[in-house]
Amino acid sequence: MPGPITHRIVKQLVELGAVRGVRVTGQAGGWSVLVRFGRVERILATQRSGHVRVFRNFKTLVRYLSGLGLSCFDVDASNFETGPITRPARPDRKAALKRVHAAAEHDAWFRAQVQEGLMDLEEGRVVTEEAHTKAWALRRAALARQIRDTSR
């Protein structure tokens, strides 16, 4: 059987009137779609990864096909099994989601700092550079005392 086809290609085939039939086949965890045009039959794949597209829910599949204008199709449920769909691992997505969450946390913290600074300005509490330098000098001195006391 030739390689899989994507949604975009199926949509173009439907628009051209080239689709001769659709067969929905059951498999472990869901349903796949085979599109027949000309003398070939090709399986529907996902846009991004090119893996076989598996619909977990039959209603979602029917809605998808109807949306394409394919309301008549054959169903082969002989190999259908309920259960999880085995998909390839995507470790890159885990790292990307961690970065997104870290960025969102930083954004929230930064916005809170800006809001606090604006509130200080509204209340007339402006810290001069001299006062800021003096406050940090006191903090450094306190930390140095603490380090000296714990090292004894």
Image (cartoon, rainbow, N blue to C red):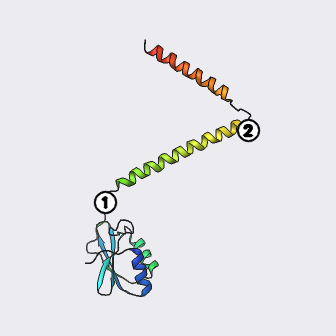
Distance between mark 1 and mark 2 Cα atoms: 55 Å
Query: Do the residues under discs 1 and 2 have CB atoms within 8 angstroms?
Result: no
Q: Quadrant of the N terminus?
A: bottom left
Residue 151 location in percent, x, y? 43, 15
- Residue holding disc 1: 88
Residue found 52% across the figure and 20% down from its top: 143
Q: Counting other residues with Cα less than 10 Å from the Cα at mark 1, is it few (<14), some (14-19), or many (20 or more)?
A: few
What SS does tag 1 mark? loop
Q: Amino acid at mark 2?
A: Glu
Q: Residue furthest top?
A: 152
Say above or below: 142 vs 64: above
Q: Amino acid at mark 1?
A: Pro
Residue found 61% across the figure and 39% down from its top: 113
Q: Quadrant of the C terminus?
A: top left
Residue 5 is left or right of residue 122, and the answer is: left
Is residue 126 visible in the rendered image? The answer is: yes
Residue 109 is left or right of residue 123, and the answer is: left
Residue 142 location in percent, x, y? 55, 19
Between 54 and 121, the one lying in front of the other is 121
Say above or below: 124 vs 32: above
Circle number at residue 122:
2
Of callouts 1 and 2, the N-terminal one: 1
Residue 25 location in percent, x, y? 30, 75
Residue 97 location in percent, x, y? 43, 51
Say above or below: 81 vs 106: below
Residue 33 is left or right of residue 64, and the answer is: left
Q: Which of the two marks, 1 or 2, is nearer to us in this view?
A: 2
